[in-house]
Amino acid sequence: MSDPGAGRVVLVTGGNRGIGAVIARRFDNAGYRVSITYRSNQPEDSSNIMAVRCDVTDTSQVDAAFSQIENELGPVEIVVANAGITADKLVLRMDEDDFASVLDTNLTGGFRVAKRAVRPMMKARFGRLIFISSVVGLAGQAGQANYAASKAGLIGLARSLAREFGSRGITANIVAPGPIATEMLDQLSEDQRAAIISMVPIGREGQPDEVAAAVCFIASDDAAFITGAIIPVDGGMSMG
């Protein structure tokens, strides 16, 4: 059965690599009109996915990116706020810039993107705002106070947007991945990786396409009555 939402315009921020790239490809394969933003590394082969340079910490760049997408593809109907950074340090070694820069990209960046997207969505009386959080935002993690705070903040942001715009046909939801097989996980030692997997009831790391599947469902017409929800894709890790 074809997706009745196919043809809608999707924007995935930070869609040039990792989970974001897999999400963008899944939407593309399903027949959506897909755009991505990247900050520095333009994807070498984005096929028919529109790639726009944009630093989500800069409001003017966010506005310019949306304008370019609107001119070429049409109004953005589905936003996946995925762009994010890490600057891991124990709190006693973390300075204010380490903390503020991560929040500015991961949390305030999500706010900037959502704010720019929502007015056209209100006119259309349809919109999907999907924020990529993390199991770390639910449970915390030593050495990641800045990252955890930013990802937890997305939950409050999304739920506030869900209340503000639900009557206009706009939903706002959170997808919270656990340990996923990406470059970030590859950077860990075997012992670190094994320790993380030991906390996952399913007993393995997740795959990026499993996160993408959850995102695409939340974007679909079948999910029209789901808003303000946290969808964990973590093998049960967030149960505690």
Image (cartoon, helix red, strand yellow):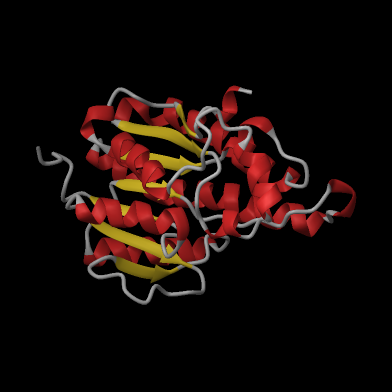
State whether residue 74 is above or below residue 133: below
How far across and how far down the image is residue 15, in percent?
41, 60
Displayed quadrant of residue 163: top left
Is 165 displayed left or right of 50 in the figure? right
How far across and how far down the image is residue 217, in percent?
29, 36
How far across and how far down the image is residue 222, in percent?
23, 28
How far across and how far down the image is residue 154, in percent?
56, 39
| The one of 100 and 75 positioned closer to us in this rendering | 100
Instruction: Locate the C terminus and report the quarter of the image it occupies.
Output: top right
Count of marks overlaid on the render: 0
State whether residue 120 is above or below residue 183: above
* Residue 75 can be seen in this image: no
Instruction: Locate the N terminus and report the quarter of the image it occupies.
Output: top left
| The one of 27 and 193 positioned closer to us in this rendering | 193
* Residue 168 can be seen in this image: yes
State whether residue 50 is above or below residue 114: below
State whether residue 53 is above or below residue 19: below
Displayed quadrant of residue 42: bottom left
